[in-house]
Amino acid sequence: MTLETERLQIRLPSTSDVAFFYKLMNTDMWIKHIGDRGINSMEKAVEYIESLKSKYHSVGFTLYVITQSKTPIGLCGLLKRDYLDHPDLGFALLPDFMGNGYIQEAATSILNDVFQNQEFSKILAITSPNNMASQSTLERLGFISQGIIHTPEHEEVLLYEKQKK
C-alpha cells in the first residue's frame, strides 16, 4: 500500500526504517502517551517492523510510515486490538514535525482509502485522557468521543469513533 498527499508519502514499513523506528519509539512523547514498547535496540526495532508487516499480510492494514521528501517523520495507520470490535487509528510523529498538520493529512488519506477499499463501517481510536493534542486531532478528523473505557491492562483511555459516510 502506498498513498501520496500534497506533502507526504505513506507506505508500508521496511527494515530500512529501523533507525527511524528506534528514534520515534524512544521519544518522550511516545513513552508518555503510547507507552514503552521495549524497543531498546536496533534488533528490537527490526522485530517490531516485521510484526507490522506481518499484521498487514494477515489483516490487510497496519501502521504505515509517513515520509516527507523520502525522510520518515511519523507513523499513521490502523491497528487491531483484541479488546476493540473494530480497527483503530494510531499515529505518532517525531517531535520536530509536530504542529504542521501532517497527521491530519496522512490520516485523512488513510481513512479515505480504508473506507473506500475495505468493508469497515467504522473506525475507532483511543488516546490517553491527558493527551489533548491527540484528542484535538481526532476531533478534527471527525471522530466522536464515546467516553472512557478500560484496557485489559486496566488503563483508562478515551474511545473515539468515526462512522463510514
Image: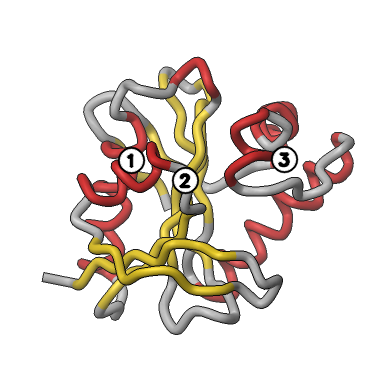
Q: Percent from the top left, x then y, of residue 141?
A: 22, 49
Label 1 close to label 2 by CB (< 8 Å): yes
Nearest the viewer among 134 and 17 is 134
Residue type marked 2: Phe
Q: Secondary structure at mark 2?
A: strand
Residue at 88% in and 41% down: 43
Q: Residue furthest bottom?
A: 85
Mark 2 sits on what residue?
91
Residue type marked 1: Ala
Separation of marks 3 and 1 at Cα, in angstroms: 21 Å
Marks 2 and 3, the one that precedes in the sequence: 3
Looking at the image, residue 154 sits to the left or right of residue 99; the answer is right
Marks 3 and 1, the one that precedes in the sequence: 3
Looking at the image, residue 103 sits to the left or right of residue 94; the answer is left
Q: State which quarter of the image contains the C terminus.
A: bottom left
Residue at 30% in and 42% down: 137
| Mark linked to residue 106 | 1
Separation of marks 2 and 3 at Cα, in angstroms: 19 Å
Residue at 66% in and 65% down: 54
